[in-house]
Amino acid sequence: MNLPNKLTLFRIILIPVFLVFINFNTEIGVLGALITFTIASITDQLDGYIARKYNLITDFGKFMDPLADKLLVSAAFISFIELNLVNAIPVIIIIFREFIITGIRLVLSSKGGKVIAANTYGKLKTVFQIISIIFILLKLYLMNFNIQSYYIVDLIQLIGDITFYMCVFLTILSGWDYISKNIKSLKEIL
């Protein structure tokens, strides 16, 4: 197994660590969740960079890398619903899209079709999801632990809200784009 694939698996292992930290909902817990999520996000950028630079792109990586992203982001957003930090409906939209696109990828690859990498909209969606989650975690940390500067909390909340709704918009756009570009392949194998 090459280094990018090991980094992808490491990111998957970090998901339960993130969940343990976030469910403590203490100063150390939220900080641990923020650090764990940030490390996992860095591995996402790092594994893609290494795979492209050293030509270590594999079908396993093309499939597991986006799946690891989906699992990490879904775990974070579902935890945020539990903590009343985000509304459930946008999170359902995000997770629904992830299941649909993953299902399409599985069907295409199982029928001998090409495993299709994420498109530009999908990559932007992931970036906005990561930024949104980091800012929501920062807001939780600052709000729950008596940080005195409300302007900073308000600014972080505003950035978190904007990036969250941008990721919802990009989720819908990237899903539509992916399906429309692959509808012909899907019709051929169904």
Image (cartoon, helix red, strand yellow):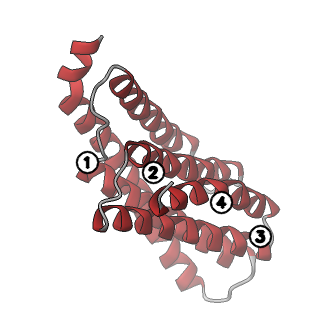
N-terminal of the pair, mark 4 or mark 2, is 4
Above or below, comparing residue 149 to residue 160 in the picture: below
Q: Secondary structure at mark 2?
A: helix
Question: Which one is earlier in the sequence, the residue at label 1 or at label 4?
Answer: 4
Q: Position of residue 141 (x, y in %)?
A: 68, 75
Report which residue position mark 3 lands on. Answer: 29
Distance, label 1 to label 3, CA atoms, is 34 Å
Q: Amino acid at mark 3?
A: Gly
In the rendered image, the residue lying farthest to the front is 1
Residue beneath the point at 51% across and 54% down: 1
Q: Earlier in the sequence, mark 2 or mark 1?
A: 2
Q: Which residue is mark 4?
A: 14
- SS for callout 3: helix
The first of marks 3 and 2 along the sequence is 3
Taking depth in this image into account, of 105 and 150 the one nearest to the observer is 105
Q: Position of residue 17 (x, y in %)?
A: 72, 60
Residue 172 image-quadrant placement: top left
Q: Residue at x 46, y 42 (%)?
A: 94
Earlier in the chain: of badge 1 and badge 3, it is 3
Compared with 99, 90 (above or below) is: below
Q: Relative to 142, does residue 75 appear above or below in the rendering? A: above
**Cα distance, mark 4 to mark 3?**
14 Å
Which residue matches tag 1? 119
Residue in the image at 76% along x and 64% along y: 21
Calculate the distance from the C-alpha at mark 4 to the C-alpha at mark 2: 14 Å
- Image quadrant occupied by the C terminus: top left
Residue at figure coordinates x 43%, y 34% from the top left: 102
Q: Position of residue 124 (x, y in %)?
A: 31, 57
Mark in the foreground, 2 or 1: 2
Residue 65 marker: 2
Tell me the kind of residue under disc 4: Leu
